[in-house]
Image (cartoon, helix red, strand yellow):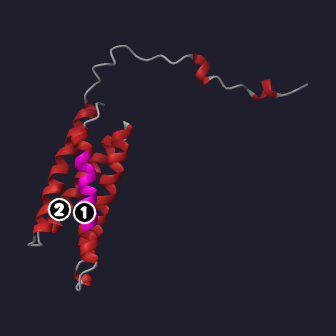
Amino acid sequence: MIWKKTIYDSLTECATVCNEFATECSNSDNINDLYRSIFINLDCADICRDLAILYVRGSENARLLAQACIDICEKCVQEVSQFNSDRGRQVCAMCQQTICSCVNIIEMALQPDVDSKSPVVEPASLFYVPSRRENLYY
């Protein structure tokens, strides 16, 4: 998978914005009414951060987490859209941008690598494990 900085930036920015929004909600006077928003934004921040790590690492599991990230970002947009504030609109916009990035991750994972025309063959010595019998001293 080819690493794209814009995708990574989108994921980390979404994590930051959602985390900040959750903190702001936690500090408000009507915190009891905002529990759902707080937890959804924290979930969104965590999954975006985790996906960014897997994506940069080139993990094949990034595709799986990207689908979950799409689902959580959609819930976050739905929840935060009820707030009529600049910060709420910022969270919605960032989550929507991140959804597009996640779609790109999924599409990139499904495409075969152009550079991998011939399969890589590992030497058998890398996988050699001595048996117990060879380790016994007589």
Residue 59 visible (yes or no): no
Spot occupied by residue 78 in the image (x, y as percentages of width and height): 15, 64
- Identify the disc placed on residue 18: 1
Residue at x 26%, y 82% (from the top left corner):
31
Spot occupied by residue 56 in the image (x, y as percentages of width and height): 35, 40
Spot occupied by residue 135 in the image (x, y as percentages of width and height): 80, 27
Residue at x 37%, y 13% (from the top left corner):
118
Q: Which residue is mark 2?
A: 91
Q: Main secondary structure of the magenta part?
A: helix
Is 10 included in the stretch rendered in magenta? yes
Give the secondary structure at mark 1: helix
Give the residue at the far left of this rendering: 84
Identify the image quadrant of residue 119: top left
Residue at x 23%, y 78% (from the top left corner):
34
Give the secondary structure at mark 2: helix
Quarter of the picture holding the N terminus:
top left
Residue 112 visible (yes or no): yes
Is 48 included in the stretch rendered in magenta? no
Residue at x 48%, y 16% (from the top left corner):
121
Magenta region, residue range: 9-20
Q: Is residue 135 above or below residue 98?
A: above
Q: Amino acid at mark 1?
A: Cys
Task: Say few, some or many: other residues with alpha carbon within 10 Å of mark 1 (under 14 / 14 to 19 / 20 or more).
Answer: many
